[in-house]
């Protein structure tokens, strides 16, 4: 089973210790992100965020550049340290972890995929995929077997001995996905992983992830700036603006009950009929990759 995630009153402020302290007071007084920046020079990237992500949910966070979505996802493995609040993963507040506990959490429980792949250019596909197991000290034969399983799962069998420079962008992203799967993480974090890909490859990778979600129990947090992608991918979606969550819900909730004018404007260009038709097909059990109504 994937892990549940509960975030309680999470704020992330960038600045000096004194600025962070003062910013938290100003947040409590109700000042906006822009006001706090003007008043004391601190950047409030996330402001009093509270919500829960369910076990095995594909939870999408969407927003424009600067909305705080990437800052937020990086707090889920403490690449960014919260200034205030709690992050409870599988019942444990990870903000209280010591160095050993945090190392074990990052090695065994969570994986992260970035937009620009993060592959080692001098290592082959299989050597890249093996890397998380290598740093865990897994013996060579076992990590080779697990890496090959992950490579086959993402459709790269036969490419394991190639270097990243010999692969297309979509194939390199598949290597990143395979690497993230090798330690069988209960929580997978994906920070705009497909935004650098061309539209057709991007759609294929979306299908790949959705098919994977159907086959394997894990919780996925997916970041995007594209509302069509968010609605296509997410079991639920959180829309962020100025470091805050504006609305959370299923695509139906956004379409039927937008929280305010900002939400209405943000979803105005989403093709409602196509999104809902696609999701209805999936709910009836049709494979994502075979029955997508928006395939070319």
Image (cartoon, grey):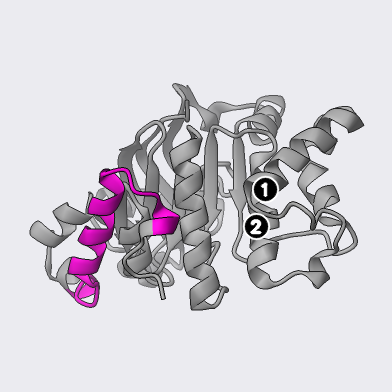
| Bounds of the magenta segment | 265-290
Q: Are marks 1 and 2 in contact (CB under 8 Å)?
A: yes
Report the residue at 50% width, 52% height from top: 209
Side (left or right) of 132 relative to 198: right
Report the residue at 77% width, 47% height from top: 129
Residue 97: x and y, percent? 60, 27
For the residue pair 270 and 187, the one nearer the viewer reads as 270
Report the residue at 53% width, 61% height from top: 205
Neighbor class of circle 2 (other Cα within 10 Å; few <14, some 14-19, many 20+) is many
For the residue pair 81 and 191, the one nearer the viewer reads as 191
Residue 49: x and y, percent? 33, 46
Q: Secondary structure at mark 1?
A: helix
Quadrant in which the C terminus appears:
bottom left
Q: Determine which of the numbered discs, if any, sits on residue 178 in the image.
A: 1
Is residue 33 in view from this perspective? yes
Residue 182: x and y, percent? 70, 38
Magenta highlight: main SS:
helix
Residue 200 counted in the magenta span: no
Query: In which quarter of the view is residue 118 placed?
Result: bottom right
Residue 269 counted in the magenta span: yes
Side (left or right) of 29 relative to 208: left
């Amino acid at each position: 089973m994937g892990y549940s995630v509960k975030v309680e009153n999470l704020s992330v402020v960038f600045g000096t210790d004194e600025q962070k302290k003062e910013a938290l007071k100003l947040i409590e007084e109700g000042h906006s992100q822009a006001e706090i920046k003007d008043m004391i020079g601190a950047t409030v990237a996330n402001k009093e965020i509270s919500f829960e992500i369910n076990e095995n949910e594909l939870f999408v966070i969407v927003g424009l550049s600067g909305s705080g979505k990437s800052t937020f996802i990086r707090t889920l493995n403490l690449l960014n340290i919260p200034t205030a609040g709690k992050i409870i993963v599988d019942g444990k507040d990870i903000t209280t972890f010591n160095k050993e506990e945090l190392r074990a959490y990052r090695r065994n429980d969570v994986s992260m995929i970035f937009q620009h792949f993060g592959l080692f250019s001098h290592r082959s596909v299989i050597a890249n995929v093996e890397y998380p197991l290598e740093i865990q000290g897994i013996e060579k034969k076992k990590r080779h077997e697990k890496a090959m399983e992950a490579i086959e799962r993402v459709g790269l069998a036969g490419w394991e001995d190639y270097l990243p420079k010999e692969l297309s962008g979509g194939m390199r992203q598949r290597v990143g996905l395979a690497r993230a799967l090798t330690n069988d993480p209960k929580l997978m974090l994906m920070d705009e992983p497909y935004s650098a890909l061309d539209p057709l490859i991007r759609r294929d990778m979306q299908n790949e992830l959705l098919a994977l979600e159907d086959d394997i129990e894990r919780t996925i947090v997916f970041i995007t700036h594209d509302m069509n992608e968010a609605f296509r991918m997410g079991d639920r979606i959180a829309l962020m603006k100025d470091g805050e969550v504006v609305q959370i819900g299923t695509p139906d909730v956004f379409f039927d009950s937008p929280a305010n004018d900002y939400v209405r404007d943000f979803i105005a260009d989403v093709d409602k009929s196509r999104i809902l038709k696609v999701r209805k097909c999936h709910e009836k059990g049709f494979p994502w990759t075979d029955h997508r109504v928006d395939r070319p």
